[in-house]
Image (cartoon, rainbow, N blue to C red):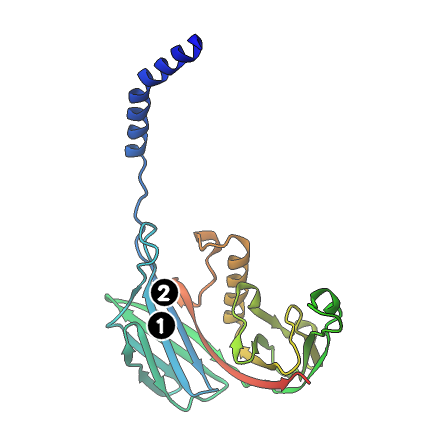
Amino acid sequence: MRNYKILHIIIITLLPFLLSNCEEVMEDFSVQKSDPQMVIEGICSSKNDSVYVYISKTADYLHPIEYSQVSGAEVVLEFGDTSITVPEIQAGVYAETYDFPEETLYTLTVTYDNISYTAESFMPKPVAIDSISSSVFPYSVYMATYPGELFYEVTFYFKDPFETQNFYRIKTYKNDTLFNGSSDIVVMKDKMFNGKAYQLLMRGYTFEVSDTVMIELISIDEANYTYYLTLEEAMTSTGNFSVPDNPITNFTPRILGHFNAFSVDSIQMIIP
């Protein structure tokens, strides 16, 4: 008991010293603010004859939810002999409709604070999906909540054109809801099946009877294939966008984001 009282007195005596030193350490520790970076996401689609450009700036480390939209930028889309000034329809969102031709090179230029950011993207012809089928998921028994419950997976089929090198992104929807997580970025190129009939089992997606499934086969150029590939790697490896992990953009000068001119074919089915 006597030793306990002595220890107690020592701790009380040293407490102000310990707290003052802790305070000095905290005062020395500071997080430097980072300069906001431009983020430009541009999409041009022959599917719905529209172009959308979303412009913002990254947030500061100390204020991560303060994501600012960029208004007042000049946005110009050029292709062939045509030049379109894309108007701002709401803060940071620029959009226009037009009958955009396929097999065409598009150039998007965004000018803000006297700096111009330029990206090019080639819109290929869409590749048609031939058909879609469903089959019983082999591990249904492990997912079932009652005996005999079945789950299904889908496969779709298409013919890859021989005369061109093709790059694809695949999107999957269940009952009008897009699977949109980091693991849902599915891209591929036709190096192993150029000019051949190809079937793709959509692994990782399971459906139940009466679910509506839609598959989009999106034809993109090589620059956007690289962007989505590095985006998926960045999202699944470190979970952040530190400098070494930034997706490879097609904008010059380099910023966050990309510009994608693409075409689409889609198919849907109801699981029987």
Tell whether 222 sits left or right of 194: left
Q: Position of residue 120 (x, y in %)?
A: 42, 74
In the drawing, what numbered circle is on residue 39? 2
**Amino acid type, mark 2:** Val
Badge 2, how many Cα within 10 Å: few under 14, some, many 20+? some
Considering depth in this image, is 233 or 68 the residue closer to the camera?
Answer: 68
Q: Position of residue 183 (x, y in %)?
A: 57, 64
Considering depth in this image, is 46 or 123 the residue closer to the camera?
Answer: 46
In the drawing, what numbered circle is on residue 193? none
Cβ–Cβ under 8 Å for marks 2 and 1:
yes
Does residue 22 lie above or below 119 as drawn?
A: above
Q: Position of residue 117 (x, y in %)?
A: 34, 68
Circle 1 residue? 54
Q: Give the image quarter of residue 87.
A: bottom left
The residue at the far top in this view is 2
Considering depth in this image, is 209 or 236 the residue closer to the camera?
Answer: 209
The residue at the far front in this view is 1
Tell whether 209 sits left or right of 246: right
Does residue 80 lie above or below 12 as drawn?
A: below
- Secondary structure under badge 2? strand
Considering depth in this image, is 47 or 190 the residue closer to the camera?
Answer: 47
The residue at 43%/52% (across/down) is 243
The residue at 40%/71% (across/down) is 41
